[in-house]
C-alpha cells in the first residue's frame, strides 16, 4: 500500500520506517529544511535503537523517501498519517495548530478517490471532528474519512514497540476505513498482535487514559519512596512486593526524579484541561502533576542535606535525558534539577552520552563535559539523574582519586549502596538508605 506520513519526528519517523519494513511504500513529509536535508542524506536526526538500520535498509529497497511537498504525498498515497507535534499551551490545553494545518494541506490536494486520513498524533477527544471540518473547509466534495490510530511508542524502544505491539487501536467510522486499517497492519494482525476496533473518540481517549495511568504509577512509586526515606525502608523491596500482584504489575513502579519527556506531562495536563471543560474534572490527576513537580524540589533538598548546603558546592550531574536510550530532554526532570541547583548556588558540571547537545539548547549556561571522568573531577557530590547503563559500570574505587567529596545521590537506584559504603562513600538512593 502507498502511505503518506506527515511529520518526521519521533512518532512519524518510527512509524514511516516500520510501515516500510512491513512492505508498504512510504513517503514522509517534513517541512523543517535542516531535518529534511539530514534525512535525504541518509542520516537519522534522533537517537532511537534500531532506527538507523531500519531506515538504511528500506531506503535501499526504495520503500521510504522524504519530501517537503504535501501535494506529492497526498497524490501518491491511499492512507495519510498525521504525526506532527501537539504541544501544551500555558493553560494545559493542547495546541492543535500543526494538526489542523496539515489537515488543510491534505484537503487542498485531495482528489476524487477515497483517502483515509489517520490521526496518529496524541490529540484530545473530538479532534477527529475538527480535522474532518478543516479538510472540508478546503475540499467540501472530497471523498475521505478521518480515523484515529494512537501510538504507544516508548522512546528508546520505539521500533520494538511498533513491530511487537501490546495492541493496535484503531478508531473508525466506516467499514471502508476499517478495511484499509487492516491492510496497513496486516502483517502484525496475522502475527497475532491484538487489534482493537473502536469508534474514533474512544480511540482518542484510550491514549490519554493509558498515559495518565502510567504517570500515576510513577508518581505513586515516588510518593512511597519518600515514605521509605522517612522510615528507613527499601523502596525496591516494597515495589517488588506489590508489583508481583497480578492486579498491579511491576512496570512503571520504579521511583526516580519524576516523569518527563514529550508525552506524560503534556498528556496529563491536556486530560486535566479537557476534563474541566467537560464538567467532570479529574482532580486526582491534578495531584499527580503537583506531586511530580514536588519531586524536583525533593531531590534538591535531599542533596542539600547530604552536602550540608549547596552554596558553591561542586556537583557532578550524570544524565540529562529524561530517560535512557534517547537524546530527548523535553520536560526532563534532570534539567529542572540541575537548573534548581544553580539557583541555590551550586556549581554544576554534567555529562550525558546522548543528550548534551539538546540540553545546551535549553540550559546554555550549563558546563557539559565529554566524559564521566571529566565530570567527576573535583566533585563534592555526585547526582545520578538518568539510568544510562554506563553509569552502572563506573569504577568508584578509581573514581575517588578525582572526587573531592564522596557523596552520591542515586535518584535512579542503579548502584549498589553496600559496595559504595565499603569504599567510604556516603550513598543514598531514592527511597533507599
Image (cartoon, rainbow, N blue to C red):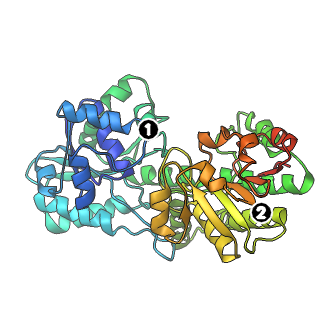
Q: Residue 158: x percent and y percent?
A: 44, 41
Left or right placement of residue 65 versus residue 169 in this view: left
Give the residue drawn at x 31%, y 48%: 173
CA separation in Å, label 2 and label 1 = 33 Å
First in residue order: circle 2 vs circle 1? 1
Between 425 and 416, the one nearer to me in the picture: 425
Q: Residue furthest top?
A: 191
Where the N terminus falls, by quadrant? top left
Rendered image: mark on residue 181: none
Location of mark 2 (residue)? 303
Residue carrying label 1: 49
Q: Mark 1 and mark 2 in contact (Cβ < 8 Å)?
A: no
Element on which disc 1 rests: loop
**Name of the residue lying farthest toward the front:** 401
Residue 380 x/y as whole percent: 75, 60
Q: Residues within 10 Å of mark 2 (few under 14, many from 20)?
A: many
Amino acid at each position: 500500500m502507498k502511505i503518506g506520513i506527515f511529520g518526521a519526528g519521533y512518532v512519524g519517523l518510527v512509524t514511516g520506517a516500520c510501515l516500510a519494513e512491513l512492505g508498504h511504500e512510504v513517503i514522509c513529509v517534513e517541512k523543517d529544511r535542516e531535518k529534511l536535508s539530514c534525512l535525504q542524506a541518509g542520516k537519522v536526526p534522533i537517537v532511537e535503537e534500531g532506527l538507523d538500520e531500519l531506515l538504511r535498509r528500506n531506503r535501499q529497497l526504495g520503500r521510504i523517501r522524504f519530501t517537503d511537498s504535501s501535494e506529492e504525498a497526498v497524490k501518491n498515497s491511499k492512507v495519510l498519517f498525521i504525526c506532527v507535534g501537539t504541544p501544551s499551551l500555558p493553560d494545559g490545553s493542547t495546541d492543535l495548530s500543526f494538526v489542523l494545518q496539515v489537515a488543510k494541506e491534505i484537503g487542498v490536494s485531495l482528489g476524487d478517490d477515497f483517502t483515509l486520513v489517520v490521526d496518529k498524533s496524541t490529540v484530545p477527544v473530538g479532534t477527529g471532528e475538527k480535522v474532518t471540518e478543516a479538510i472540508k473547509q478546503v475540499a467540501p466534495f472530497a471523498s475521505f474519512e478521518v480515523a484515529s490510530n494512537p501510538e504507544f511508542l516508548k522512546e528508546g524502544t520505539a521500533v520494538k514497540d511498533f513491530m511487537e505491539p501490546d495492541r493496535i487501536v484503531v478508531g473508525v467510522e466506516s467499514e471502508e476505513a476499517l478495511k484499509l486499517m487492516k491492510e496497513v497492519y496486516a502483517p502484525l494482525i496475522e502475527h497475532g498482535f491484538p487489534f482493537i476496533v473502536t469508534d474514533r473518540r474512544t480511540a482518542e481517549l484510550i491514549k490519554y487514559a493509558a498515559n495518565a495511568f502510567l504517570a500515576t504509577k510513577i508518581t505513586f512509586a515516588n510518593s512511597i519512596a519518600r515514605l521509605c526515606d522517612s522510615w528507613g525502608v527499601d523502596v525496591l523491596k516494597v515495589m517488588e512486593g506489590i508489583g508481583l500482584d497480578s492486579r498491579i504489575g511491576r512496570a512503571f513502579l520504579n521511583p526516580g526524579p519524576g516523569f518527563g519527556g514529550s508525552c506524560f506531562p503534556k498528556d496529563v495536563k491536556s486530560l486535566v484541561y479537557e476534563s474541566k471543560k467537560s464538567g467532570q474534572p479529574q482532580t486526582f490527576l491534578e495531584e499527580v502533576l503537583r506531586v511530580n513537580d514536588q519531586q524536583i524540589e525533593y531531590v534538591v533538598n535531599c542533596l542539600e542535606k547530604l552536602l550540608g548546603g549547596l552554596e558553591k558546592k561542586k556537583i557532578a550531574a550524570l544524565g540529562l535525558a529524561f530517560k535512557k536510550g534517547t537524546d530527548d530532554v523535553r520536560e526532563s526532570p534532570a534539567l529542572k534539577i540541575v537548573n534548581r541547583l544553580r539557583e541555590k548556588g551550586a556549581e554544576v558540571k554534567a555529562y550525558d552520552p546522548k543528550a548534551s547537545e539538546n540540553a545546551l539548547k535549553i540550559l546554555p549556561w550549563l558546563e557539559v563535559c565529554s566524559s564521566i571522568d571529566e565530570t567527576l573531577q573535583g566533585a563534592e557530590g555526585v547526582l545520578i539523574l538518568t539510568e544510562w547503563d554506563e553509569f552502572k559500570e563506573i569504577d568508584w574505587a578509581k573514581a575517588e582519586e578525582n572526587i573531592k567529596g564522596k557523596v552520591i545521590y542515586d535518584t535512579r537506584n542503579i548502584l549498589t549502596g553496600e559496595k559504595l559504603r565499603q569504599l567510604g562513600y556516603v550513598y543514598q538512593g531514592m527511597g533507599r538508605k
